[in-house]
Image (tube, rainbow, N blue to C red):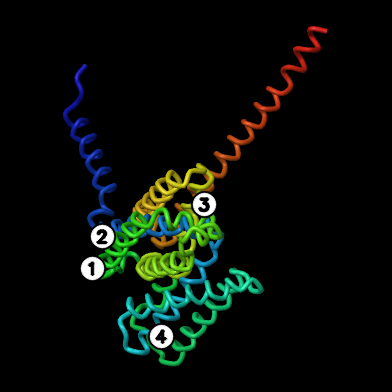
Amino acid sequence: MTTSPYLLTNRHSRYTTNIDSLLEPFRYFSGAIAVATIAGALCALIGIYVVLRGMSYIGHGLSHAIFGWAVVSFAGGLNFYVGAGIGGFVSTLMINGVARRKIVGADAAIGIVTTAVFALGVALVSRIGSFSRNFEAALFGNVLGVTSTDVLVVACVGVAVSATIFFRYRPLLFSTFDPEVADIVGRSVRSNDALLSFLLAATVVATMQVLGVTLIAAALVAPPATARLLTDRFSRMMVIAVGIGAVSGFLGVYGSYFLDIASGAAVVLTDSAFFLAAFIFTSDRVRKHWRSNRLRDREPQGADSSRA
């Protein structure tokens, strides 16, 4: 029995149509997919130190502060990236300075400093009545509206942050896990904190247009937190977190095309899905390990009773 040439042609055309539909996002916004992938990996890389230092809230707060500084830079006629970057770095130094005083904790310092600067930005927007960058895009992200300059900035910041962490790997690791001993052996914790603050501010400024002020915190925290559930080794945690961040950026933007939803939100939802999957997986694994240990503990007792 032979297959009709018409059926073969029909099947081939449907197969070609399906492939074409899957490749459509790459035709229309391949740049958006690329910049979201880089931004996801970059946020995850710097977010590892944020999570391990127990300052996960700083990503949320700093992104709001940088929005305020962006408005200040616009009002003062400064370049967006220069003004927001310097302002973000100053904000992180202020947070670290306030947090060092034991009376006020890091969470309170973050809340006070960042909300004050964000309020300043909102006040200036209401006063001057215009803002060079779309207000909604700054808050929620607009990866489809990124320019070639934005892509170049994200790529350059990604390379610079990666190189800095590579060459300062041990000092940053030491000051993160044991800051008191690091000070004793001559590793300046303050200089490492200042360096990390600068890298964090640069990351938030570079990715703000991609993910938005309200969503950057999740991109900073979710991939490292997911990796922390899967491993205890720092080097392995870094690889897993960066991989999850990059894949989430790619799948989020790619899937948003077919789901017709905001790209920044899709990236964060993908991050959250990875975290949920890891949480369920590790919970089940721990439960099985606990049950196997209980059965192992009971076996000798059963053997002794049967011998008696």
Helix, strand or loop at mark 4: helix
Question: Between marks 1 and 4, how big is the CA–CA gap?
Answer: 24 Å
Question: What amino acid does circle 1 point to?
Answer: Ser
- The percent coordinates of residue 95 (x first, y second) are 53, 74
Q: Which residue does the numbered mark 3 point to in the structure image?
A: 225
Q: Which mark is first along the chain, 4 or 2?
A: 2
Asked whether residue 287 is in view, the answer is yes
Helix, strand or loop at mark 3: helix
- The percent coordinates of residue 133 (x first, y second) are 35, 79
Q: Which residue does the numbered mark 4 point to in the structure image?
A: 72
Which of labels 1 and 3 is toward the front? 3
Which of labels 3 and 2 is toward the front? 3
Q: 179 left or right of 151?
A: right
Question: Between marks 3 and 2, how big is the CA–CA gap?
Answer: 28 Å
Q: Which mark is first along the chain, 2 or 3?
A: 2
Question: What amino acid does circle 2 point to?
Answer: Gly
Asked whether residue 257 is in view, the answer is no
